[in-house]
Amino acid sequence: MVSRRGRGRPRGESDARERITAAAVHEFGEHGYESATIRAIAARAGVDPALVHHYFGTKADLFAEAAGFPLRPDVDVPAILRGPREGAGERVARYVLESFERPEVRKRGIMLLRTVIGSKLASPVVAGFLTREMLPRIAGALDADDAQLRASLAASQIVGMIVARHIVKVPGIADATVDELVDRIGPTLQRYLYE
Amino acid sequence: MVSRRGRGRPRGESDARERITAAAVHEFGEHGYESATIRAIAARAGVDPALVHHYFGTKADLFAEAAGFPLRPDVDVPAILRGPREGAGERVARYVLESFERPEVRKRGIMLLRTVIGSKLASPVVAGFLTREMLPRIAGALDADDAQLRASLAASQIVGMIVARHIVKVPGIADATVDELVDRIGPTLQRYLYE
């Protein structure tokens, strides 16, 4: 998403896109993910709601753009889960761990996690996105009555892993290879998701 | 620990204890857990180092007192692991989850987690305690070459669970019972620790 931002576009479009992104940051911050509307974001940016949809797609897409996280786990993880069930836990673990080896993902991911967990104010915004968009899509890719709990359990291990490896930098986990961690975490995710 | 604080003690002792705790908060905050010394804390409080040991025990004990967390996982979890290996993962999961049902543990635990994860400054203090005291003691209760990694993996799932249930309040996990979560998380901890 980031690479799309204002490159080689007519000046008027680039201006409108920037106004919309700024308005989105404001509206999401003020009202939380669930209550913020495309209509209100468009009004604040002084554009038609249709233009917001045209440039950014859905509210989830616009949020991802506004949050600046160069990864779409809300899209990618369900895609992984639509593949073969065998080894799905390991593929999800590898997707997350390898993504966080990329400096731009790690930097932005740490910032987002610090903000969500550290600030009472910011928590509801990302938490709203997580619970309204990401987890339902992951749960939707599972075939189980307790799909929501299963998706949330997997998310809890993934968040705990990122916090341990990249924020608290716990010995053992911080210095393990991606392969070692996939070996340990993969079966956990597989069990939470399917067993 | 909290209930011991300044109740029914001679005024001089209560004063000295409060000065020591305040000095500890300062020294841990300034130098981090690893570099802070009982000697420097005693000097700042204007007392003999022996008195700090007499009132508070080890550096870990003093840290627990200064942090005000009404739980000693660095003592309790190794004690649990010294029991029968079978069901140890579930007992650890239950210990953490049931402790966090107590409002005073939950409130203080959330505050500590928010601070550790949310603040670059505070992270090294609690992270230092975690990696110098808690994880080595848990690893010490395990009989494995990779005990440090095993202890850290269990910690990552526990932290992820507390964040999901009590900070982000993820649906599915936030509204599950302790028993339901022990059923799901227990086997994960058991596998990380022993399998």
Image (cartoon, coloured by chain):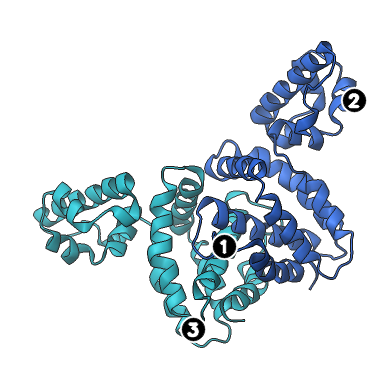
Chain colours: A blue, B cyan
Where residue A58 sits, quadrant-wise, is: top right
Label of residue B143 in the image: 3
Q: Looking at the image, is mark 3 or mark 1 earlier in the sequence?
A: 3
Same-chain check, marks 2 and 1: no
- SS at badge 1: helix
Mark 3 and mark 1: span between their CA atoms?
A: 20 Å
Is residue A35 found left or right of B3 in the rendered image? Answer: right
Q: Which residue is mark 2?
A: A54
Q: Position of residue B96 (x, y in %)?
A: 51, 67
Is residue B181 found left or right of A58 in the rendered image? Answer: left
Q: Amino acid at mark 1?
A: Ser
Q: Which residue is mark 1?
A: B156
Mark 2 and mark 1: span between their CA atoms?
A: 41 Å
Crowd class of label 1 (few under 14; some 14 to 19; many from 20; radius 10 Å): many
Where residue B1 sits, quadrant-wise, is: bottom left
Same-chain check, marks 3 and 1: yes
Q: Amino acid at mark 2?
A: His
**Chain of the residue on which disc 1 is drawn:** B
Crowd class of label 3 (few under 14; some 14 to 19; many from 20; radius 10 Å): few
User: Observer-nearest residue: B109 or A60?
Assistant: A60
Q: Name the quadrant of the C terminus of chain B.
A: bottom right
